[in-house]
Amino acid sequence: MEANSDRQGLEWQIGVWDRISQLYLREIDPRFAPVVENVIARGRLQPGQHVLDLGTGTATVATAAAPLVIPGGRVTAVDISPEMLTLARRRVADSGRTNVATGRGRRRRSRTSGEGTGRVSRSDSERVMSLAPQLERIHGELTDARRRAHEIAAPLGPERWSTRPAVDEWSVAECLIHLNLTSGAFLPLIRDAIARGRDRQLFSAGPYRRDVVGWVLSWLTEPAVRLRIKTTASFVPASVDPKDRVLEAFDMLQEQLTVCVREADGLALGRLRVISPFDARIKYNLYSCLRIIPAHQRQHLAQAQEVIDSFRAGIGR
């Protein structure tokens, strides 16, 4: 039964990545350039080394690493998604890198000492699931946002999904796509901050505090919005994708955010800085970042609900 559940979960993940591969290439991949540079710099690659790029996606890291390990080195780029691998192979071919090999990943269950069952012990499970109360709150807010997104989108047909209530206002689809773009931009920044915290051994059990910038941004972002700020052009949806595809991407990104919340537990979140993906001049600590994201989601989910309310009131089409 457990093996069947694992297999179904893996198939679901593969399906999500397959379906959003073009969206990822078009909207998210271009924003990863500075993150890729940082990853490569932190890797300190040398000629002759062998690099394994797990979850290669479109092979941006793999193709950047390839020239740094020659002569004698090679890169193996692996992904579970056939569609993402197609994009990866295309990028490798276009780059002309001959020391990059791509392959399909398969999930293997780990074994624990003494049992050989791959199961996690009760004490390990409790340790993994137990979060600091402040992070537990954020975890719950991300879960609530996921549920709310589905509630808002569920009754909408294709026309209402993509219809704007006014020329200068977003549709429900655009609200959710904007959140996906935002999460996609925040995730590598959060992961980088977590990695820096571990490298520097910056540990703390809390309590955590937002800095002044983070507190102000959270306050401005929460519904009702106190100050409307025009979003950066790169976070304005370029097109409208079908509802099911957008929701699948939203679910996948929310799951990745909750994983980051769990991985951040135990780190000194107030000492790790994150640069805003919206404006490089703005910086705040990692705890502020984790508070801003669900607040921003509540803002745009409330905006999406207002669009639906306008339809019910006969405003717009």
Image (spheres, helix red, strand yellow):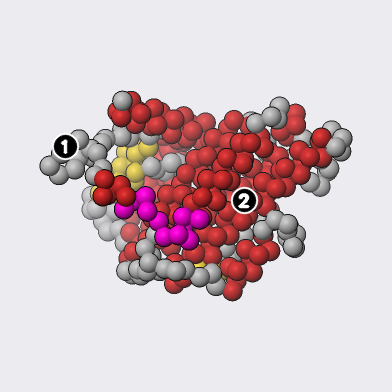
| Residue for badge 2 | 297
Q: Residue 7 carries which label?
A: none
Q: Residue placed at 72% from the left, 47% from the top?
A: 303
| Residue for badge 1 | 116
Task: Return the x and y of residue 62 as percentages of the image width and height.
Answer: 37, 47
Q: Give the range drawn in magenta.
A: 127-137
Task: Return the x and y of residue 186 as percentages of the image width and height.
Answer: 53, 55
Residue 36 left/right relative to 110: right
* Residue 132 is one of the magenta-drawn residues: yes
Q: Report the front residue among 136 and 36.
A: 136
User: Rounded to the nearest whole Å, what is the CA distance between mark 1 and mark 2?
Assistant: 42 Å
Residue 277 visible somewhere in the drawing: no
Q: Residue placed at 61% from the left, 36% from the top?
A: 150
Q: Is residue 159 above or below residue 182?
A: above
Q: Residue placed at 39% from the left, 27% from the top?
A: 8
- Characterize the local packing of mark 2: few (<14), some (14-19) or many (20 or more) Cα atoms within 10 angstroms: many
The quadrant of the picture occupied by the C terminus is: top right
Task: Return the x and y of residue 230 as percentages of the image width and height.
Answer: 73, 57
Q: Is mark 2 on a helix, strand or loop?
A: helix
* Residue 102 is one of the magenta-drawn residues: no
Residue 183 visible somewhere in the drawing: yes
Q: What element carries label 1?
A: loop
Mark closest to the chain's N terminus, 1 or 2: 1
The quadrant of the picture occupied by the N terminus is: top left
